[in-house]
Image: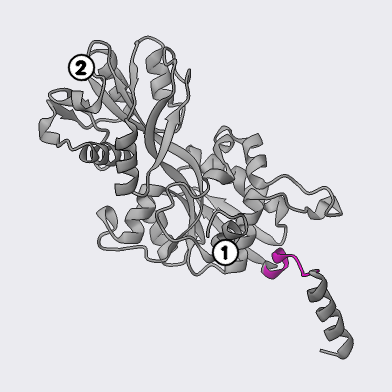
Amino acid sequence: MNRATKTIGLLMMTLGLVMPAKCLATGASFTIVTGKAEGVYYALGTALAKALSEGLSDVSITVRPGSTARVNLGMLHSAKIESAFVRSSTAHQAFNGTDQFTETPIANIRGIASLYPDAVQIVTRPGANIKALKDLGGKIVIMGEIASSTALDAGNILKAAGMNLESLGRIEWVASSDAARMIRTDIADVAFLSSSIPSATVMELCTDTPVAILGLEDALIRKIVETYPFYAMMAIPADTYVGQTRPVKTVGAMAQWVCGAEVPEDLVYQLTRALWAPVSSPSAGNDENPMPAAAVRVAWAHVKGTDLALETALNAMAIPLHPGAERFYREKGLVK
């Protein structure tokens, strides 16, 4: 390095004219593995990859349909992929080596962002006379499919409420489509459904059945969130469903974007910043008219993108943040 180069470098550092972070990752490749090709994860991931690529032209971002969370996170663990979409409760299980990850903990899983809520929606049939969780004693309760996210949610909520499964009249382990049929035909009294808001199952059910959505009390919500940090407080807005005239308080997990701990810090910082902050596009020609943040452009492309918000980016984040993501959130004051 000659004297002139050194002088220019010192001058740039003094004036704060540092090279943009994206130059640090020139030629980098980054994969986002989602869910099945026909699912929400894949559609959202495709929109996200496109939006990020427009702002980070030096990074090759690809999206791939995935399999089960266990398979996807197994590839993350072995560094075969850089990142994946996963539910916050599953990410917590993976990092801590519990439930389906008892034999193979995913110690290198790190958080980038929480994307959208997956709320627990408790639907009761007309005439069941269920006003609160304590009224579930002796009732026929649908807990979701065995080993499903819904079953996990239902069990955790009942435990936090001080109820045990033996106090219920009968438990049905069925999918959401069967749950709707059983509520509609009075075969079951109440169904736990974990879904984004609005739930297509609940919307369809409401067209011909005057169901009620059971809310949770504030004290119970606080206990659930404190006991299970992969949940966040949520609300089903008024008029989401036919006949639901008031907001309904509940809890839920978050769809999260996670990556491997070994992914370079500067690369993850670039991606996190591009997700939430306006970026300068090479095609724009200057920095005066930056492109909207990737989250904004994802919202233009996919309905679930409208739930992406910087204010909720750390909701239900129960695993360590990747240092690159943490650096960005610290700059924004979201991490102390």
Q: Residues within 10 Å of mark 1 (few under 14, many from 20)?
A: many
User: Which label belongs to residue 324?
Assistant: 1
In the image, residue 206 lies at what x, y percent? 39, 14
Q: Residues within 10 Å of mark 2 (few under 14, many from 20)?
A: few
Badge 2 element: loop
Badge 1 element: helix
Q: Residue at x 12, y 23 (%)?
A: 138
Q: Is residue 85 above or below residue 236?
A: below
Q: Amino acid at mark 2?
A: Ile
Q: Is residue 214 above or below residue 305?
A: above
**In the displayed image of the protein, which residue is found farthest to the bottom?**
2
Residue 113 in sight in this render: yes
Magenta stretch holds residue 90? no
Q: Amino acid at mark 1?
A: Gly
State the scheme by which the image is colored.
one colour
User: Which label belongs to residue 187?
Assistant: 2
In the image, residue 116 lies at what x, y percent? 50, 40
The answer to whether the residues at label 1 and label 2 have Cβ atoms under 8 Å apart is no
